[in-house]
Amino acid sequence: MGFAVEQECPQCGAPIELEETDRVIRCPYCNVKNFLFAPDYFRLLLPPKVSDKDILYAPYMRFKGSVYLCKGTSIGHRIVDITRQGSTFRQLPVSLGLRPQAMKMKFVNPGVPGSFLKCSLRRTDALARAARHTSLAGPGKLVHQAYIGEAFSLIYLPLFAQQGKLFDAITNKAIARLPQGEDVLDPAIEQNPKWQITFMATICPQCGWDLDGERDSVVLTCSNCDTAWAASEGKFIRVDFNAVPGRDEDATYFPFWRIAARDKGLEIHSYADFIRVTRQPKVLQRHWENQDMCFWIPAFKIRPKLFLHLARQMTILQKDFDTEEEIPKKKLYPVTLPRGEAVQSMKLTLASSAMAKKEIFPLLPQVSFTLRESTLVYLPFNEGGHEMVQEHTRVAINKRTLEFGRYL
Ligand SMILES: [Zn+2]
Ligand SMILES: [Zn+2]
């Protein structure tokens, strides 16, 4: 389940309530729209309920997303939702329990009074621990793991020290002893944290038009000058995109990341190499030798099983569509999976496409990709009963899994 966050409108100061995965926030009072950006990850705090104490914030690492493991000859996956105590103080509660669900969090900014304990837990260790708790893949050697579609943040729990003990500043209860006194905390305190989130006005950098996007969009589009934009280092950077025109007026356009890449290890450079190496039951065509190998990864969050299924189907087909460089003026499904996470799922897609898993899986650790090009491609899907069906390939997505994916 997602956590609620409260943030003041940077324009008029009115309180805005948002979900932790929201990136585009619109103020209901002054109607100003902003895109939220944090350079590494979002830092949130649980507001203390005591007012007359010096607050000390303890970090908890939070991860919500899908874990995939390639083990033996099978791929296991699971949605995980964890918080882990991140400081070196072992006496603190291991997780935040139900607190974040019962309260509204706030973003950490330089104006917050109090001090912050350093987070010594590394992101990769927290993720590895999450993976260990997913005893899902079959027997055999672990050859690859990936974490996709993640909400990754730090949540701070407010504490205060009194009479040799640490108290929870929400419940006012003692939670840990400080046998060597309060000085023991000093070296663990972050000096001068200047963490801040950036509010970026959702204005097209090229033409000044208002950019379009939904609350969980990570790519915004300009319908005036037909451009797409993603945030990087506090700026909007142009995203290469194209669209495949659909015949149906009511088509919904779903975004995919098309990533051209070469791999060292299995030596897959062309589409023909891919067909050969993964042993697809297809008759090789000569022109495939000159066709770059492209991965097609859904640019939206969806259940792990379906995500992998879609990526595999689209990558095996690797269709050469007729495209145009115009943002479809119809229904656009939001891009909720950043390009970086799509790149993380390339090896997984390769593993999943392999017909002879016994042959390919042991070689996965030595596979490394060189990226050549990445493009966001909008493909038309039409309504077909319980499914959305891609017009040219007949690849289908169950509608109910889409609704679920928005809350991943
Ligand atoms: Zn406002
Ligand atoms: Zn524009």
Image: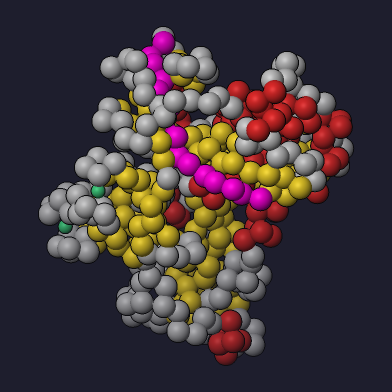
Query: Is the residue 197 above or below the residue 343 in the image?
Result: below
**Magenta residue check for 86:** no
Q: Is residue 268 left or right of residue 215?
A: right
Query: Can you give x and y, in whole percent of width and height, for residue 247 in the image?
Result: 34, 15
Residue found 31% across the figure and 55% down from its top: 35
Q: Is residue 52 left or right of residue 42?
A: left
Q: Is residue 305 visible?
A: no
Residue situated furthest left in the rendering = 30
Instruction: From the viewer's side, name the closer residue of 159 and 408.
Output: 408
Instruction: From the viewer's side, name the closer residue of 184 and 155.
Output: 155
Residue found 44% across the figure and 54% down from its top: 100
Q: Is residue 391 visible?
A: yes
Residue 176 in which image quadrant: bottom right
Residue 87 in which image quadrant: bottom right
Query: Can you give x and y, in whole percent of width and height, for residue 295 in the image?
Result: 60, 36
Which region is colored magenta?
370-384
Q: Quadrant of ligand 1?
A: bottom left
Instruction: From the viewer's side, name the closer residue of 197 and 132.
Output: 197
Query: Is the residue 239 above or below the residue 358 in the image?
Result: below
